[in-house]
Image: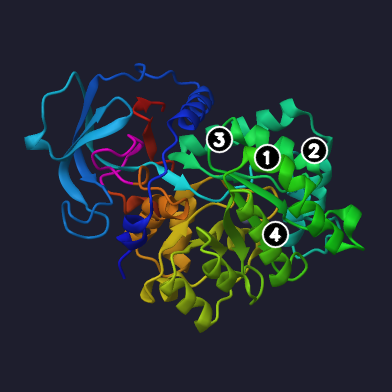
Amino acid sequence: MTPGRSCERAAPEPDPTADQATKDAMSNATTVSPAHSASTASTLITNIAALVTNDPSLGDGTPLGLVQDAAVVIEGDRIAWTGDQSKAPATDNRVDAGGRAVLPGFVDSHSHLVFAGDRTQEFNARMSGRPYSAGGIRTTVEATRAATDEELEANVTRYLAEALRQGTTTFETKSGYGLTTADESRALRVAARHTDEVTYLGAHIVAPEFAEDPAAYVALVTGEMLDACAPHARWIDVFCEQGAFDGDQARAILTAGRARGLHPRIHANQLSYGPGVRLAVELDAASADHCTHLTDEDVDALANGRTVATLLPGAEFSTRAEWPDARRLLDAGVTVALSTDCNPGSSFTSSVPFCIALAVRDMGMTPDEAVWSATAGGAAALRRTDIGRLTPGAYADLTLLDAPSHVHLAYRPGVPLVTGVWRRGERVL
Ligand SMILES: [Zn+2]
């Protein structure tokens, strides 16, 4: 398998204006001030025992492009140079990595961070084998609708700070807990203050008010709600699943979004077999997310299309569900991304390192593959080549581990190994 494949083919779509807002938000979310403001000053990070570049033409020739005894030069918000530390050019500043590992900042291409309330009792009941009759997603919808803008904003900021401390430098996030025109567009406005990877998920479930008339809800999602939401989002998503939206409804929703300039991604084949993955490939969705229940036809479709399979092991962990078979996808040549699915119901983790450990332990991925999928794979799932790699021209988003190798992310599960983070050239942790 060639994990670099789709990333190579993906078109770069940087948006410097929006990136600035994200950078500010993520910087403000930490208590650590940047060491210096972004400028054209150059900084050498040297004495890196193992550098993951995700450029197969560098280092050991694997998809990770692993360079030993390496150095990186940051200039402004970009990587200016990568290679053997003995050949590094002169710079204004110098940072000694102390024989540790450096890798691209994680790209978490699937999260649901705009919500209020939590579902501790539901999780506790599920893990204790007790019945629990509260309303799942509906519980979060009620709490989110009742929250003030300030409460939603504070929640997003808090979870972003959490993610940043664990090495995430880019994240996608969605609406989907409002399910009215006003609440969905509000969620997207909140999200857009923190990232340019914003997804309209009015079609998360049928809103409770439309339980008897799902067709009317689809009409709302593809009509008035879409009109209000499209200006604040880049992507459109649908939960294509029994009990949510069927293949025909999903097609109608994604097609309507595409007509308004939003690009599709799909929650597909999470709980059962279904049409979601094939629909994703047919519509050239950037990503089919979950991919837990796949037929051979689904795998073939992914292998022959441009759609990334994004695996979200936090969801299987938190619901004690069957793991997605990453090995089967990788062996078929499918590009795989790993993300958190951070949400209050089925996967309340913001930790990409935790997901890497699960993917290696339980989904048949090697440590190299899991790290690739959480960096370059996430970038491919967002159709970006300016992140998820440490090569000249890419954004200077780096994670420094307190470990000599990226393999420690799986080898030392649960240990807070991230000891430094640079985002857009600024040290933010
Ligand atoms: Zn999700």
Residue at point 34%, 58% (across, down): 9
Dot 1 or dot 3, earlier in sequence: 1
Q: Position of residue 157 (x, y in %)?
A: 60, 30
What residue type is disc 4 on?
Answer: Ile
Q: Nearer the viewer, mark 4 or mark 2?
A: 4
Residue at point 32%, 54% (across, down): 407
Dot 4 or dot 3, earlier in sequence: 3
Q: Is residue 413 above or below residue 171?
A: below
CA separation, marks 1 and 3? Answer: 11 Å
Residue at the disc numbered 2: 182
CA separation, marks 1 and 4? Answer: 21 Å
What residue type is disc 2 on?
Answer: Ala
Residue most extreme to the left = 86
In the rendered image, residue 111 lying in the magenta stretch gets the answer no
CA separation, marks 4 and 3? Answer: 29 Å
Residue at the disc numbered 3: 160
332 displayed left or right of 236: left
Image: magenta residue range: 389-404
Dot 1 or dot 4, earlier in sequence: 1
